[in-house]
Image (tube, rainbow, N blue to C red):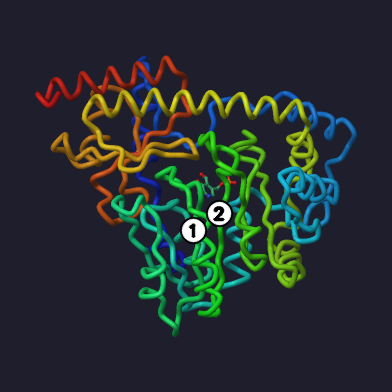
Amino acid sequence: MFADRLKNIKPFRVMEINELAVQMENQGHKVVHFEVGEPDFPTAQTIAEAGKRAIDLGWTKYTAALGIPELREKISGYYGSKGVHVATDRIVITTGASGGLTLLSALLLNPGDEILVTDPGYPANEVFGALVNASHRRLALNPKSDFQLSMSAVISEWDREITRGLLISSPSNPTGAMLERETLSGLAREIKKLDGFLILDEVYQGLIYKDDCEYWTGIEIDPDIYLLNSFSKYFGMTGWRIGWMVVPASAVEPLSRLAQNLFICPPTISQYAAIAAFETESLKIHEERRAQFAKRRDLLAEGLTRLGFTIPVYPDGAFYIYADVSFSGMTSTEFCGLMIEKYHVAITPGTDFGTYDADRYVRFSYTTSVSDIKRGLNQIEKALLARGIF
Ligand SMILES: Cc1ncc(COP(=O)(O)O)c(C=O)c1O
């Protein structure tokens, strides 16, 4: 009854963990949430007020498919404040990065084409190809190479008959690893030679914790890169469903046509709210939150290491720690099952993010309070002690 492509679209395994977590909470247990991929902070008041104001002023109608000019200009100005020139008319406002990915699949892939994605990587990446009857090929990222994608892997896996492009994220979900500037420019160069496209997902940009890290964005490297960004993570606006892309100038008109037909426009109220995300007061709040994330990351990483986990790559960005759980003698599926059922700690198994060595890893999200992180670590310690591991 339903289309064949549904066979290739799996639910996130973390949803089962989520369901169990809800059951536990309904039974009155306190659950520690390390599984959630969204900031625990509410949207900054400055942004929320701007959203309310838009409603009061009746700014609730459709907008241009590419987004309101004020927001596109703000984003261009934001890049400008970081020393990067991005022309306003190359900025496309989207219904979250997810809306951006949907548009890019429709723009860039024909049925039968293939897109390269990383393993581990954001689980939904492979679905965007499936949506237009294209396939994906996973490129394994090795912790021994700091979860970095090698140029040789891209070249050797690229099938000139069907491969059309590469989708990669930095900082990465789930590893928190960041691409080196040189790696990205090498990839962009090679992919151009292969006549392919490169999509760079920067939705965790802003959530970077390296003190000496100089700001850069993929768009400086090559204007032909399709850049995805979002107000969900650094700007704390997950439920507002708003994001943006920077695309090559030639792609703007076809994207506008697609967006008109698929979405009409991105959510209007959210667009007006997002303008306020760049106010000085909002940016101050976001920077304070970033500092809190950095403290939580260090606390969690130290606690996990003490308990025996290996963190192959210390995460410089996003809000995740991808840790090796094999010392426990359990697979990640077993470990996450045990932790939620008996110890009421929700963690995402690596199997959600790919297949390569995936059952060795678990993803911890530190979008939870310091006291919950401490409680979670205590619970893990108890579980390991009960099994005679710690
Ligand atoms: C790497 C990555 N890309 C894209 C998205 C989708 O984000 P949005 O909320 O902007 O649709 C997520 C969400 O978790 C993500 O982790």
Asked which quadrant contains residue 356, the reply is bottom left
Question: Could you give the CA–CA distance between mark 1 and mark 2, rounded to whole angstroms?
Answer: 6 Å
Residue type, numbered disc 2: Asp
Secondary element under disc 1, as helix, strand or loop, is strand
Q: How many marks?
A: 2
Q: Nearer the viewer, residue 267 or 126?
A: 126
Taking the view exactly as shown, the residue that stands out farthest to the front is 212
- The residue where tag 2 is placed is 201
Taking the view exactly as shown, the residue that stands out farthest to the bottom is 161
Q: Is residue 284 above or below residue 254?
A: above
Q: Is residue 361 left or right of residue 229?
A: left
**Ligand 1 neighbours mark 2 (CB distance < 8 Å):** yes
- Measuring 31% from the left and 48% from the top, which residue is drawn there? 351
Q: Picture coordinates of residue 76 (x, y %)?
A: 77, 50
Q: Is residue 155 above or below residue 346?
A: below
Q: Picture coordinates of residue 236 (x, y %)?
A: 62, 33
Secondary element under disc 2, as helix, strand or loop, is strand
- Measuring 79% from the left and 46% from the top, which residue is drawn there? 77
- The residue where tag 1 is placed is 168
Q: Is residue 46 left or right of residue 69?
A: left
- Measuring 75% from the left and 57% from the top, which residue is drawn there? 264
The C terminus lies in which quarter of the figure? top left
- Measuring 60% from the left and 51% from the top, which residue is drawn there? 97
Q: Are marks 1 and 2 in contact (CB under 8 Å)?
A: yes
Q: Is residue 158 above or below residue 54?
A: below
Q: Is residue 268 left or right of residue 228?
A: right
**Ligand 1 neighbours mark 1 (CB distance < 8 Å):** no
Q: Is residue 331 above or below residue 300?
A: below
Q: Residues within 10 Å of mark 2 (few under 14, many from 20)?
A: many
Q: Is residue 40 left or right of residue 27?
A: right
Q: Picture coordinates of residue 271 (x, y %)?
A: 77, 43
Residue type, numbered disc 1: Ile
